[in-house]
Image (tube, grey):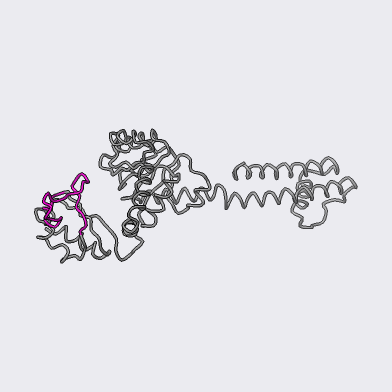
């Protein structure tokens, strides 16, 4: 039984105990209802007041039995009440109220659909970077809710519009679908894309043949964990120092230097200029290690004798920069200048 059911059972037991005590004194002693009720409460509470009337031998035995039973029942009631207050419905109600208040204020966040092994790793990574997120999963357990009590969670089917609406999908920064089954991810991505056409959606795929289906459904990027694991294992074996450097820089463990992306908007004064002409390094201190076009492809200069410093920047380009937090902020301000 859940805490609420145990609480109802405890109330039922106390009612039965009172009824039995009143009935017993009225039958055995022949007392009136008011005297029997008073004697029952005095006996159950064990406060030690004097008897209403002298008891017969049968009445004394009945009182002894009533005291023993009442001690057991009251002990159960206290235990159940404490469980109800601190482990059951009250705690659940407080958690739900806090969650609703948190979701009402949430914006520019990520929605993580699925809280399995991949979902938990994703949530921990976002939490480490202090990025707001909400978890949506149909199979959330009480153990998960207790262990990850600081996480915003919604229990429900992520492919349902009502559930995604609760997760504030219209105000979300992106959606990460990491459900265990590929069909679930396809339906979730399709629903999310229909609800928010501008949402950044990343999905997991267990099978390679599902990748194109997820892209057609609306996913911006599709990740296959098995393929990534295989590539990373091979790369670590062949180029361990390179992978160690990239992992350290991209993970943000080194607070002094990390990699960030800077998008060039329409009004940016950098458009039409090359990195060399704009003197980004001199003005910001950040080091540009790559340039992506609007579709996420790496841009390179056709001439083997030239490097990325000579590439003309265009609207929608993304500068991949390495530097400190302050240098990244300086780059962002510099890119927005007209």
- Identify the residue shown where x is 26% and y is 57%: 260
Residue drawn at x 74%, y 42% as measured from the top left: 19
In the rendered image, residue 322, in percent from the top left (x then y), is placed at: 25, 60
Place of residue 155 in the rendered image (x, y in percent of width and height, measured from the top left): 45, 42
Specify the farthest residue to the right.
Answer: 57
Membership of 188 in magenta stretch = no
* 298 vs 165, nearest the viewer: 298
Quadrant containing the C terminus is: bottom left
Direction from residue 22 to residue 251 in the image, left or right: left
Q: Going by the image, does 249 lie left or right of 86?
A: left
| Quadrant housing residue 205 | top left
Query: Percent position (x, y) of residue 149?
Result: 48, 52
> Residue sitting at 28 percent across and 43 percent down?
199
Residue 169 on image: x %, y %: 33, 43
Q: Main secondary structure of the magenta part?
A: loop
Q: Say if the magenta span includes residue 301.
A: yes
Image position of 201 (left or right of 264): right
Q: Nearer the viewer, residue 276 or 87?
A: 276
Q: Image quadrant of residue 204?
A: top left
- Give the magenta-colored segment's residue range: 288-315
Quarter of the figure that contains the N terminus:
top right
Q: What residue is drawn where x is 53% and y is 51%?
A: 91
Total numbered labels: 0
Front residue of this view, candidates 239 and 246: 239
Say above or below: 70 vs 49.
above
């Amino acid at each position: 039984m859940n805490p609420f059911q145990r609480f109802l059972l405890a109330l039922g037991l106390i009612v039965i105990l009172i009824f039995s005590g009143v009935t017993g004194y009225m039958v055995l002693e022949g007392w009136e209802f008011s005297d029997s009720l008073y004697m029952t409460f005095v006996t159950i509470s064990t406060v030690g007041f004097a008897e209403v009337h002298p008891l017969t031998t049968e009445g004394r035995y009945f009182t002894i039995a009533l005291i023993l039973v009442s001690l057991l029942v009251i002990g159960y009631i206290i235990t159940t009440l404490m469980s109800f207050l601190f482990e059951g419905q009250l705690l659940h109600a407080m958690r739900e109220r806090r969650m609703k208040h948190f979701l009402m204020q949430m914006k520019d966040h990520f929605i993580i659909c699925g809280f399995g092994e991949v979902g938990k790793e994703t949530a921990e990574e976002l939490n480490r970077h202090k990025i707001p997120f909400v978890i949506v999963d149909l199979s959330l357990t009480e153990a998960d809710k207790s262990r990850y009590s600081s996480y915003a969670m919604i229990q429900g089917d992520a492919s349902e519009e009502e559930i995604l609406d609760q997760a504030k999908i219209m105000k979300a920064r992106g959606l990460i679908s990491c459900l265990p089954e590929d069909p679930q991810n396809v339906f979730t991505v399709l629903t999310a894309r229909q609800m928010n056409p501008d949402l950044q959606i990343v999905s997991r795929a267990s099978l390679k043949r599902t990748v194109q289906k997820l892209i057609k459904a609306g996913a911006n990027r599709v990740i296959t964990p098995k393929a990534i694991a295989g590539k990373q294992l091979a790369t670590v074996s062949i180029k361990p120092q390179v992978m160690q450097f990239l992992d350290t820089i991209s993970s943000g463990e080194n607070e002094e230097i990390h990699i960030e992306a800077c998008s060039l908007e329409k009004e940016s004064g950098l458009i039409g200029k090359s990195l060399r002409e704009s003197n980004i390094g001199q003005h910001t201190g950040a080091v540009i290690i790559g340039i992506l076009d609007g579709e996420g492809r790496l841009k390179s200069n056709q001439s083997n004798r030239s490097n990325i410093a000579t590439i003309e920047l265009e609207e929608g380009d993304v500068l991949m920069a390495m530097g400190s937090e302050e240098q990244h902020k300086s780059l962002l301000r510099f890119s927005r200048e007209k």
